[in-house]
Amino acid sequence: MVHRLPWRIVAALAMLSVGVLLLGACSSSAPQTTISDASVNNDRIWSVYTIIWIAAAVVFVAVEALLVYTIIKFRNKPRTAHGRPVPVHGNTKLEIVWTIIPAVVLVVIAIPTLQIIAELEKRPSEADNPLEISVIAHQFFFEFRYEDQGIRTTNELHIPVNRKVDLVMTSNDVIHSLWAPRLGGKVDSIPGRNNHMWLEAKETGEFDGQCAEFCGVGHANMRFKVIVHDEAGFMAWMDEELNPTPGGDAAAGEAFFLNGPCAGCHAIDGTTAAGTVGPNLTHFASLPQIAGVVPNDEQNLRAWLANPPAVKPGTGMPNLNLTPAQIDNLVAYLQSLK
Amino acid sequence: MATQVAVGQARVEAEPFAQPRGLWSWLTTIDHKRIGILYGVTALLFFFIGGIEAMLIRVQLAAPNNDFVSADQFNQLFTMHALTMIFLGVMPLSSAFFNFIIPLQIGARDVAFPRLNAFSYWVFLLGALLLNAGWFFGEAPNTGWFSYANLTSPAYSPGHNVDYFVLGLQVLGISSLAAAFNFLVTIINMRAPGMSMMRLPVFTWMTLITSILIVLAFPALTVGVTLLMFDRFFSTNFFIPAAGGSPLLWQHLFWVFGHPEVYILILPAFGIISEILPTFSRKPLFGYSAVVFAGAGIAVLGFGVWAHHMFTVGMGPVPNAVFSIATMLIALPTGVKIFNWIGTMYGGHLDFRTPMLFAVALVGMFIIGGLSGVMHASPPVDSQQQDSYFIVAHLHYVLFGGSIMGLFGGIYYWFPKITGKMYKEALGKLHFWLMLIGFNITFFPMHWVGIEGMPRRIYTYNSGYGWDLWNLISTIGVFVLAIGFVVFIVNMWLSVTLGEKAADDPWDGATLEWTTPSPPPLYNFKHTPRVTSRIPFWSQKYPEVYGDDDHFHHHATDAAADDHAAEHAPASAHAVAHDEHAHEEAIHLPNPSYWPLVTAIGLTLVFAGFRWNYAYHAITYIGVVTLVVGIYSWALEPAMDDPAEHAEAH
């Protein structure tokens, strides 16, 4: 009885795997990809990552080829005179060889690993003139505090390009993890601890990120953006934060709602906001009351957004420390949701 | 389900010990083979449930912004999928083989403590039910199988969800510990004469190492879960930072258990394919000592790498560097195993029956999982992979491509021995190809979405991140896997009910279990075998190839003392010799007992009472009384009848 492996299936599987990789490499729109040279620290990571990929690819091809060769060469071989293959019990030299070769590969990986650990975990010095920002994670949003400048934002981390940013990370409740993959790796925000991570963007633009440590029912919607400005743009942004122009912009309010802290808990049908922790706000402007306690008018809405627990003690919605400009924009947007 | 197996097994023999029949005989059984079957059938049932949970997860993630399940349902599903597959699927399926095969492989009549063995099974079953009880109240555990503090504290998890996790794991841990001690003692003390440690079959070796790992690793989990239990039920603050506790303490305790647990899951599968590959290559295992010491090396190193799960918690550069190097070192013994498996096949006469296909698939798939594991041994790389789908891909290549491939190989390999029937080869191969292809379609794309920045444990995602297509492909793969599982169940069912009668030694095996009838009689071996070789049955069947046995004396000098008796026995030319005088010996088997079941019920009630704390913890007190009565009755019950009764049967 002959048992043959269906080789065509094996070949098809191999083709499929290669196809998956190629297609993936061609996919153009990946705003959260880890393959990026948009920051100095991600370059550092990839200086190790690339070596490991090459080593892994070589080992993968070599060992799988050996396996496949063995399968093909020795399948269903006719028996020897005594009906059994020649019994071979082992070979000490071979054991030594296939211990030492992987050990050499590991050394090649380990040396740059240790160097980059040291670089990434070193806090920026005064000479780097770092911008220090506190990151306070909450269920389910990130708060960024520019203590020296007196600015607070939620889910929008504005930073200048080509300058080291020194992030000091903690959490207000449970463990979270700040991860904007195109700008580098993640570090956890842990209650009762201050963790550090530095970041130096090389190009301006918006970079997507989201919480990477499972933190509860709103985890999937805990998204944030890193906005990298050029030096002038960053000064203009700070100026606008400190002296906001009056009057709300509904479009800006919608963008803030969808990308800011709101969508972590609230849903608005027909948009990407799909949070389930708080009430659905699809027809907010038609509701008679805010949070079921005060009449739904602009003044109450402003008070509510400024500090929800002050309006309704015990509410699940925390004080988000919204800026006056953010409140203006949100009010304009929310009042358009008939 | 159990009774179905019993029907297939029923053979009335002209022997002193006929197989008992009926439900009661299964509830009171202390026969390692029946307990093995109970473990196996229960594990497959939970494997099915865990698979359903995986399918629901994949349906939810098939498209962006899907609302097939809610966020909380999704969290319950991924938590229970992991807990079910790890504690109720893979571990008990390994236990099924420990139970059924180990006494047969070492030439023993049963395990060292048969009633403790029954107790382990019943505690496992009841613990599994307690862990799953939350489903009936819509509040299954929802904080992940790792359940990081302080998300599990009453403030952030006010429902009962985490209670089922805490109490279920407490009970399951007791089961694992009892079983591990049992197999430690069994393997060290119950080996047949001449079976020195370096003649143990490799599956027995890996079982021994796994048992040591369980004994050393589970107490860390028990401590962690006990502290969490105190935090939740008695308002302590071990893990609550606002009161001075440390959430990172939980992570250390959990991973001191959790990383060795990975090897607890994979080493039995390594052991299984170290039996399958030689059998279907018709060659002894290449580098036996290297494979054994590599397994032991993995186990030792496995205790020094737990914090590689914590590279992003801010331990600092020195701990990250140390744990990184330790983790990379594990690649060495793992590589040694892979090369020796290929060396076993090299020059052999490979026969690609279903068990062999699964064994080779383990080697091929584990290489991928092993290489991605080396990647996140490097903390800078890990900071981009941790908690992303890349890890989901990695862990499934290790635990599915590794453990589960090996365990299914084991099911097909020992199916004829366990049931006395042959499975259908064509259906077995169909199952294999569906599983291998479905597995790769499901999990290979996860590498890519992980690299593209998709985090784990998110119930929804937006379009426009390049994740949509790959998630859809993964979901399609799950359905291929599901069809494969249906084929497997059909095959098992048809084979048990209508299958051809299996030969005693259908694969031309090398180890002692193949010297027994299929299925083996209640007492396994009429006469205790004597062993003078690492491949005793081959040495007996092919003395002209393996008979001289020089090799074994050369390598296993520690066996010399054990061999002394065997070499002076009349039939020493044969590796499996039976002492002529042994015909005189009577077979003593312990009596069935229901006290292990009663004790297990009492133990489970003690813990269940914390969840259902009605009427001044009445359930806990009923449990305590049942437990005490059970233990005392168990201790005072005679283990076996008066030997005189059995003497009459001869």
Image (spheres, coloured by chain):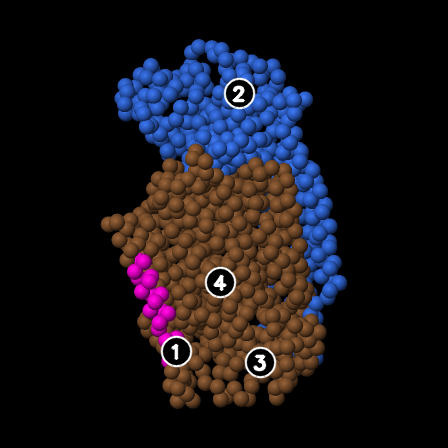
Chain colours: A blue, B brown
Q: What secondary structure predominates along the stretch shown in magenta?
A: helix
Q: Of the numbered discs in the image, which one, if any, rests on residue B640?
A: 1
In three-dimensional space, the C-alpha distance between marks 3 and 4, rounded to whole angstroms, equals: 26 Å
Q: Determine crowd level at label 4: few under 14, some 14-19, many 20+ residues with C-alpha closer than 10 A.
A: many
Name the amino acid type tagged 2: Tyr
B634, above or below B395, in the image: below
**For residue B638, what is the image quadrant?**
bottom left
Q: What residue is pinned by disc 2?
A: A146
Residue at x 32%, y 21% (from the top left corner)? A311
Q: Residue furthest right?
A: A93
Q: Are marks 1 and 3 on the same chain?
A: yes
Q: Determine crowd level at label 3: few under 14, some 14-19, many 20+ residues with C-alpha closer than 10 A.
A: many
In three-dimensional space, the C-alpha distance between marks 4 and 1, rounded to whole angstroms, equals: 24 Å
Q: Quadrant of the N terminus of chain B?
A: bottom left
Which residue occupies the foreground of this view, B513 or B50? B513
Please report whichever mark, 1 or 3, sits nearer to the chain's N-terminal start.
Answer: 3
User: Nearer the observer, disc 1 or disc 3?
Assistant: 1
Q: What residue is pinned by disc 4?
A: B180
Please report whichever mark, 4 or 1, sits nearer to the chain's N-terminal start.
Answer: 4
Left or right: B202 with respect to B430? right
Name the amino acid type tagged 3: Arg
In three-dimensional space, the C-alpha distance between marks 2 and 4, rounded to whole angstroms, equals: 55 Å
